[in-house]
Image: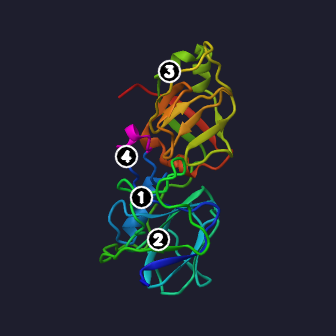
């Protein structure tokens, strides 16, 4: 039995293995997946000396607890949360040494939703289509963590990080998403388009890794009917029959039949990973680049 492994003591509400995902497989019906807050995930990997895109853990709301079988370096980024090692407070957003057999506890998010736990060497589960990411929609990749699971770790590289902590953006008080209208904006009345780009919505508690659902104004269609299924992209804003926009995130379906009123710029999506239910959402129309 290898000592390069993590034992999961407490899996938390939803903890998954993520990396940069598996782009380029939409023609096979496979979405990109990967860490929702990629800047936070990349930072965690840099802090422990991992290569870019190494697999790490994405927690949701109430963290997790882990016990390494060998001494490791760990960094937790994303949603701020309390960190302890064998009950003693440890730094968030900085490299932390965790001795073999010690209990690393990642607590409940103080603000935001998702924290990222990078371990020196990276999580070394078997890749699927070039990625170790868990995809909740397709079921590809490792299953979400469960209590008692054991995760293999890769071989660490020499730690080159020479910082005590690193600045990170706070979870958004308001989510502002730049959106290019189309391809099906003409399926909505002019008033609906005006409402979409001028009124405030709120993040719904029904949101997940597949899509950020909204509450608030409803968008009226210009005519009835349904579309044949069309290709969907990351950031597509689909409007189901209830009229409330849904922003597609990393585990989104690759096709869909509801009209897409616009597409959010990919660079605006990481904050959506940290937007708690009730967070105001505004869509700002921009020209196609």
Q: Where residue 81 appears, x then y in whole percent?
A: 59, 66
Q: Secondary structure at mark 1?
A: loop
**Marks 1 and 2, the one that precedes in the sequence:** 1
Circle nearer the viewer, 4 or 3:
4
Q: Are marks 1 and 2 in contact (CB under 8 Å)?
A: no
Please give left or right for residue 12 compared with residue 73 in the image: right
The answer for how far apart the CA atoms under marks 4 and 3 are is 24 Å
Which residue is tagged 3?
Answer: 184
**Residue contact between numbered discs 4 and 1, judged by CB atoms under 8 Å:** no
Estimate the x, y position of residue 249 in percent, counting from the top left. Answer: 51, 43
Residues at marks 3 and 2, CA–CA distance in whole angstroms: 43 Å
Of 274 and 167, the residue lying toward us: 274
Closest to the camera, between mark 1 and mark 2, is 1
Most foreground residue, 176 or 33? 33
The alpha-carbon separation of the residues under discs 4 and 1 comes to 11 Å
**Sequence order check: which comes first, mark 4 or mark 2?**
4
Residue tagged by mark 2?
75
Tell me the residue that label 4 is attached to. 23
Residue 152 to residue 254: above or below: below
Q: Secondary structure at mark 4?
A: loop
Give the magenta-colored segment's residue range.
23-31
The residue nearer to you, when weighing 25 against 162, is: 25
**Residue 200 on image: x %, y %:** 64, 33
Kind of element beneath mark 2: strand
Going from N to C along the chain, the mark reached first, 1 or 3, is: 1
Q: Residues within 10 Å of mark 4 (few under 14, many from 20)?
A: some
Marks 1/3: CA–CA distance: 32 Å
Q: Earlier in the sequence, mark 4 or mark 3?
A: 4
Q: Residue at label 1?
A: 19
């Amino acid at each position: 039995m290898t000592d390069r492994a993590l034992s999961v003591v407490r899996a938390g509400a939803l903890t998954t293995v993520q990396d940069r995902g598996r782009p380029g497989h939409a023609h096979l019906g496979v979405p990109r997946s990967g860490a929702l807050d990629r800047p936070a995930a990349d930072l965690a990997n840099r802090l422990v000396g991992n290569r870019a895109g190494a697999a790490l853990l994405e927690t949701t709301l109430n963290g997790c607890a882990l016990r390494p079988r060998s001494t490791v370096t760990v960094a937790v980024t994303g949603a701020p949360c309390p960190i302890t090692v064998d009950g003693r407070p440890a730094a968030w957003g900085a490299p932390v040494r965790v001795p073999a057999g010690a209990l690393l506890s990642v607590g409940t998010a103080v603000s935001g939703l998702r924290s990222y736990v990078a371990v020196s060497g990276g999580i070394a589960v078997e890749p699927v289509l070039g990625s170790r990411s868990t995809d909740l929609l397709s079921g590809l990749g490792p299953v979400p963590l469960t209590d008692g699971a054991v995760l293999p770790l890769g071989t660490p590289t020499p730690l080159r990080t020479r910082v005590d902590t690193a600045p990170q953006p706070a979870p958004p008080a308001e989510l502002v998403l730049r959106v290019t209208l189309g391809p099906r904006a003409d399926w909505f009345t002019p008033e609906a388009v005006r409402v979409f780009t001028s009124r405030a919505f709120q993040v719904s508690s029904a949101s997940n890794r597949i899509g950020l659902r909204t509450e608030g104004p409803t968008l009226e269609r210009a005519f009835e009917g349904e579309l044949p299924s069309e290709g969907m992209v990351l950031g597509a804003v689909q409007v189901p029959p209830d009229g409330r926009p849904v922003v597609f995130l990393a585990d989104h379906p690759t096709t869909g039949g509801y009209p897409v009123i616009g597409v959010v710029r990919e660079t605006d999506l990481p904050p959506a990973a940290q937007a708690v239910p009730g967070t105001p959402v505004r869509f700002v129309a921009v020209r196609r680049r």
